[in-house]
């Protein structure tokens, strides 16, 4: 998970600077964003506590929020991958893929 | 049973009641009938059956049945032997069976076929609905995914460009990558537009807008392409229409940009002329836009297929060939008309006619204002009409064609300091005037003057002009700029209150970051959920609300319903990643003022806020 | 070319010496047919007699269609130059071997005793490789009540039940033209055959074929099958629209396996659509197309109607035949078959299909070469 947080932090700064924001403007926003990101990733872990019992709607809601957050933080690659994974019906398989990708 | 003379006469009389048959035909008929009765020859049966079927006449069929029944009743009663009666009965059964019973069976079959056809139709309709739904989803997803990816690619290329880390050949490669990305974005948009058009997904979004401003934006779109074709001159003749028209500005622009792009694409040297004609029609205006070029033109065969999809002439020219097809379909959807005239080798002329039935009068505040123009080339028609408009509306207009006179006027103007100064000149001239304006700005008397460079068409950095236009500034801009410059309470204009409701804190922070960057004086309150947002709304008065649709507990639709029960709610915009038509329809149905897509599009956000600010200040 | 059409009761009306006699007989009347052929052969020793069994015969006088078991055998007698035609008899295996290349161009009438698995291929090959065009024909019929199970081909005294007979007529002197029409139009979405073997359709769109069809048209019963209400359009050539693709009838169903057997073979990945009947007006319009043959001189028409048409139309079939007679204005003879051979469009290759009315008009060319 830390790898994703670090990678996203770097991307967030680059992305927001491109809009003309100064570093001191970006820093608090990115910090909050990373806190949110960590929360969502933990929530994802919780939802997948028992992968075979995970409910698609619940998982989808979390992935939807994760995708939106990643986009705003400039990590578009990962956001797109998350979006693709939303179409999975097999929860156990989805869990394996997410595990490899995020944790 | 034989048809003797007596019986023939009687039968003739019976049949004669219902039908008028020539004697000769009657005789043949009776002979056949006799053969049927006596020899069981069915020629009679088949002939009558055939005639009834061919005539398709209910009345005739009824009369025939009547005649048959009457004839057989007569023959039965007239029969002298039981054997004869049985024969008559048997032949009657046969006739009745063939003419009517069999036809009833056949009708039943047809009824069953109709039921089956209906069943198949229902099944097909259901599948079609499913397919359209899937297609809707697909359009939404592809649109989102492709555009996101392309935007990301384009964004990162721009970052690399702005970092200035590449030079020489590598920089050229970067420029080519940029162009290719833009071209791909354009292609993707074209394909998605055609898909949307074909599946009826295209939404008409009407708004009030200025025509001249729209046309300038169209010209801006092709400015880059024009620069590459140095041998082409763009001429415009756009008389100023002092009202805002109500229409789908985005799609009209799409059509015009397409026509202009094509004109540039298919013209190697000469001119491209953009003209507009207004005609008052009832309470509104009929507007005719035309784009005429001196390009390669088209043959009559090419003209026939010019609006068909994938028709493209000279394959070395870029593009899929969907542009004019989309333009034509859009024009139809906008209840307009797109026509073309062309001569091969000489050029083409495209005309778009649209009726605007609703207009809004707006006042362009130029009375007693001073406008100073420097134009070192011939005045084009469009310039003349704008000068006439300004003077007609009470402005004082000064026009100079000589540099020295212009500079002299500016330096010695005294009491008549111009409110706006426009410069239209050659490349070297701008640099010179830029330096002049730098000096003038140091003078307190020019503190409130706006300096505009027009018709620039060169890639220059002009540091001291306030606004730089690739072509001519739209007249409507005069109003806006003057209002901005002259209003002493500039800060108060931006003093509006925003409420943003989203369950994701990051979304709220991003919103605030961008909004305050552009509008530092607006007040923004952030609510982390539906109930919190409603609570805030009850305490404070807001000018604008942005509302996330997908939230736990109360979703955006629920929140809006609750807000509506309170008094006097401001415009509420939905904030959503879901751009399906069904969602957009639901948003409209619930009464949202509009929608802003996720991830946040800063320009759209700025536009909405600006509109609210302008509305509040007028 | 002199010609006359007679029933077995009218044979004395033949007033010239024919060179070819083509006869059709209801399959249960083989004995009568044999007797009639013997009489004809005795009378005309040099004549070639070819024949084909049918489900029932078609004749150009009222009632046009014989419905009872005591159907009459029908014959067309033609006076065609001996050197202008050839008769060939093949088995399904022997027909695939290279035939001798002929130096003349021929058209053909083809009669098959029964359907065999590579018949469609054979029909195509004959036209492409053997350069015999156009071709028309039919698969012999059998009545339901007949003790004889297979259709039969007859040639000069012998019966054949595993064969295909080609009557080749040279194009220099004679013209064979016509087309196949049907009264259906394709409806609904394209579907793909995902599992099939020979003439059995196992799966459509990866689901049991019977299930898909019943979803579409409702419960398929014995009556539905026997009334030939739901043929399929089979499109193997994606360039052809469905309406020009061959029709195919359901022969039987297997509820356990969920499969459907057809009257012709079907390949995997073929696209199919179900057919619904055209309205009466469209049906009448189609018959109008045959007016082009009206009053053609020295001509005779062969009519191969699918048993399905008879089942669909019932007693109404004769109305159409009466109408056809008025439009065609030619003598015609034919029978109800279990598969017809003809082109959907006049310029196309002939194919094997079901539920068509295939009409072939044979006439003598007016600009023929002189001997």
Image (tube, rainbow, N blue to C red):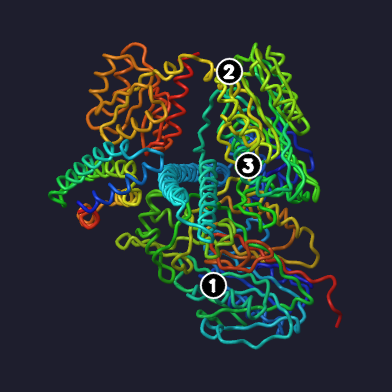
Q: Quadrant of residue B609?
A: top left
Q: Is residue C225 left or right of residue C288?
A: left
Q: Residues within 10 Å of mark 3 (few under 14, many from 20)?
A: some
Tell me the number on the disc at residue C120: 1
Instruction: Please state which of the two labelled residues, at mark 2 or mark 3, is closer to the viewer.
Output: 2
Residue B17 visible in the shown view:
yes
Instruction: Give the foreground label among 3 and 1.
Output: 3
Secondary element under disc 2, as helix, strand or loop, is helix
Cα–Cα gap, marks 2 and 1: 96 Å
Instruction: Please say if the residues under marks 2 and 1 sit with CB atoms less than 8 Å apart.
Output: no
Say which residue label 3 marks.
Answer: B223
Confirm whether circles 2 and 1 share one chain. Answer: no
Mark 2 lies on residue:
B445
Instruction: Please indicate, yes or no, whether residue B34 appears anywhere in the rendered image.
Output: no
User: How many marks overall?
Assistant: 3
User: SS class of the residue under badge 1?
Assistant: helix
Instruction: Identify the chain of the residue marked 2, using the numbered disc in the image.
Output: B
Residue B28: image x %, image y %?
74, 46
């Amino acid at each position: 998970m830390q790898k994703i947080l670090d990678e996203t932090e770097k991307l967030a700064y680059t992305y927001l600077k491109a809009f003309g924001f100064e570093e001191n403007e970006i820093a608090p926003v990115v910090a909050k964003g990373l806190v949110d990101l960590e929360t969502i990733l933990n929530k994802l872990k919780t939802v997948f506590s028992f992968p075979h019992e995970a409910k698609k709607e619940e998982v989808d809601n979390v992935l939807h929020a994760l995708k939106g957050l990643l986009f705003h933080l400039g990590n578009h690659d990962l956001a797109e991958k998350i979006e693709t994974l939303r179409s999975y019906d097999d929860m156990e398989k989805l869990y394996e893929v997410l595990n490899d990708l995020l944790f | 049973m034989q048809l003797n003379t007596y019986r023939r006469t009687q039968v003739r009389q019976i049949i004669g009641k219902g039908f008028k048959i020539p004697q000769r035909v009657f005789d043949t008929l009776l002979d056949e009938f006799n053969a049927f009765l006596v020899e069981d020859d069915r020629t009679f049966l088949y002939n009558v059956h055939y005639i009834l079927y061919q005539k398709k006449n209910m009345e005739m069929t009824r009369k025939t049945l009547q005649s048959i029944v009457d004839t057989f009743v007569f023959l039965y009663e007239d029969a002298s032997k039981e054997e004869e009666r049985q024969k008559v009965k048997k032949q009657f059964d046969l006739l009745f069976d063939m003419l009517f019973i069999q036809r009833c069976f056949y009708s039943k079959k047809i009824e069953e076929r109709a039921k089956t056809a209906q069943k198949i139709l229902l099944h097909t309709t259901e599948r079609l609905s499913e397919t359209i739904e899937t297609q809707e989803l697909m359009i939404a997803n592809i649109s989102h995914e492709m555009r996101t990816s392309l935007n990301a690619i384009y964004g990162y290329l721009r970052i690399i460009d702005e970092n200035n880390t590449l030079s020489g050949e590598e920089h050229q490669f970067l420029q080519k990558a940029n162009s290719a990305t833009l071209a791909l974005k354009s292609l993707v948009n074209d394909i998605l537009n055609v898909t949307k058009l074909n599946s009826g997904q295209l939404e008409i979004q009407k708004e009030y807008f200025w025509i001249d401003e729209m046309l300038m934006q169209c010209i801006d779109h092709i400015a880059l392409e024009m620069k590459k074709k140095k041998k082409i001159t763009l001429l415009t003749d756009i008389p100023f229409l002092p009202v805002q028209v109500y229409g789908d500005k985005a799609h009209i622009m799409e059509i015009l940009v397409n026509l202009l792009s094509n004109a540039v694409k298919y013209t190697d040297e000469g001119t491209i002329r953009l003209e507009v004609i207004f005609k008052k029609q009832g309470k509104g205006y009929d507007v005719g836009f035309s784009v005429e070029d001196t390009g390669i033109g088209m043959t009559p065969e090419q003209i026939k297929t010019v609006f068909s999809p994938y028709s493209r002439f000279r394959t070395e020219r870029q593009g899929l060939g969907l542009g004019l097809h989309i333009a034509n379909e859009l024009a139809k959807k906008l209840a307009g008309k797109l026509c073309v005239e062309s001569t091969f080798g000489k050029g083409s002329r495209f005309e778009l006619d649209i009726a605007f039935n609703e207009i809004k009068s707006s006042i362009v505040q130029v009375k007693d204002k001073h406008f100073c123009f420097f134009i070192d080339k011939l005045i084009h028609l469009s310039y003349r009409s704008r000068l006439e408009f300004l003077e007609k509306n009470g402005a004082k207009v000064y026009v100079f064609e000589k540099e020295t006179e212009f500079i002299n006027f500016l330096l010695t103007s005294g009491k008549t300091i111009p409110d706006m100064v426009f410069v239209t000149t050659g490349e070297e001239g701008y640099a010179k005037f830029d330096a002049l304006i730098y000096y003038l700005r140091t003078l307190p008397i020019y503190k409130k003057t706006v300096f505009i460079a027009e018709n620039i068409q060169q890639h220059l950095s002009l540091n001291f002009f306030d606004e730089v236009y690739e072509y001519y500034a739209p007249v409507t801009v005069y109003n806006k700029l003057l209002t901005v410059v002259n209003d002493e309470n500039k800060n108060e204009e931006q003093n509006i209150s925003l409420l943003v409701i989203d369950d994701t804190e990051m979304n709220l922070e991003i919103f605030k970051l961008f909004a305050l960057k552009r509008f530092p004086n607006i007040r923004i309150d952030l609510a982390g959920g539906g109930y919190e947002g409603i609570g805030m709304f009850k305490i404070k008065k807001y000018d604008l609300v942005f509302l996330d649709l997908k939230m736990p507990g109360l979703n955006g639709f629920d929140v809006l319903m609750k807000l509506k029960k309170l008094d006097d709610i401001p415009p509420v915009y939905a904030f959503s990643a879901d751009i399906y038509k069904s969602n957009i329809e639901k948003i409209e149905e619930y009464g949202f003022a509009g929608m802003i897509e996720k991830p946040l599009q800063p320009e759209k956000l700025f536009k909405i806020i600006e509109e609210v600010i302008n509305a509040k200040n007028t | 070319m002199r010609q006359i059409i007679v029933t077995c009761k009218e044979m004395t009306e033949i007033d010239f010496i024919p060179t070819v006699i083509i006869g059709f007989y209801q399959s249960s009347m083989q004995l009568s047919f044999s007797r009639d052929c013997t009489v004809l052969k005795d009378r005309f020793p040099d004549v070639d007699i070819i024949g084909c069994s049918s489900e029932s015969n078609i004749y150009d006088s009222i009632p046009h269609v014989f419905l009872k078991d005591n159907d009459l055998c029908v014959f067309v007698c033609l006076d065609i130059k001996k050197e202008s035609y050839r008769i060939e008899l093949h088995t399904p295996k022997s027909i695939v071997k290279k035939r001798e290349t002929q130096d003349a161009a021929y058209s053909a009438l083809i009669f098959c005793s029964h359907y065999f698995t590579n018949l469609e291929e054979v029909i195509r090959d004959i036209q492409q490789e053997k350069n015999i065009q156009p071709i028309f024909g039919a698969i012999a019929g059998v009545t339901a009540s007949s003790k004889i199970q297979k259709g039969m081909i007859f040639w000069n005294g012998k019966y054949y039940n595993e064969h295909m007979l080609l009557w080749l007529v040279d194009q220099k002197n004679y013209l064979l033209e016509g087309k196949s029409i049907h009264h259906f139009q394709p409806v609904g979405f394209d579907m793909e055959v995902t599992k099939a073997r020979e003439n059995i359709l196992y799966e459509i769109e990866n689901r049991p074929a019977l299930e898909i069809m019943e979803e579409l048209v409702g419960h398929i019963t014995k009556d539905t099958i026997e009334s030939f209400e739901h043929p399929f359009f089979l499109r193997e050539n994606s360039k052809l629209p469905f309406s020009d693709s061959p029709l195919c009838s359901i022969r039987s169903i297997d509820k356990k396996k969920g499969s459907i057997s057809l009257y012709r073979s079907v390949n995997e990945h073929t696209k199919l659509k179900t057919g619904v009947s055209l309205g009466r007006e469209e049906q009448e319009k189609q018959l109008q197309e045959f007016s082009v043959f009206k009053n053609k001189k020295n001509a005779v028409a062969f009519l191969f109607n699918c048993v399905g048409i008879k089942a669909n139309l019932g007693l109404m079939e004769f109305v159409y035949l009466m109408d056809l007679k008025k439009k065609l204005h030619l003598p015609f003879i034919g029978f109800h078959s279990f598969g017809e051979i003809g082109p959907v469009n006049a310029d196309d290759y002939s194919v094997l299909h079901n539920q068509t009315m295939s009409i072939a008009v044979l006439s003598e060319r007016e600009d023929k070469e002189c001997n």
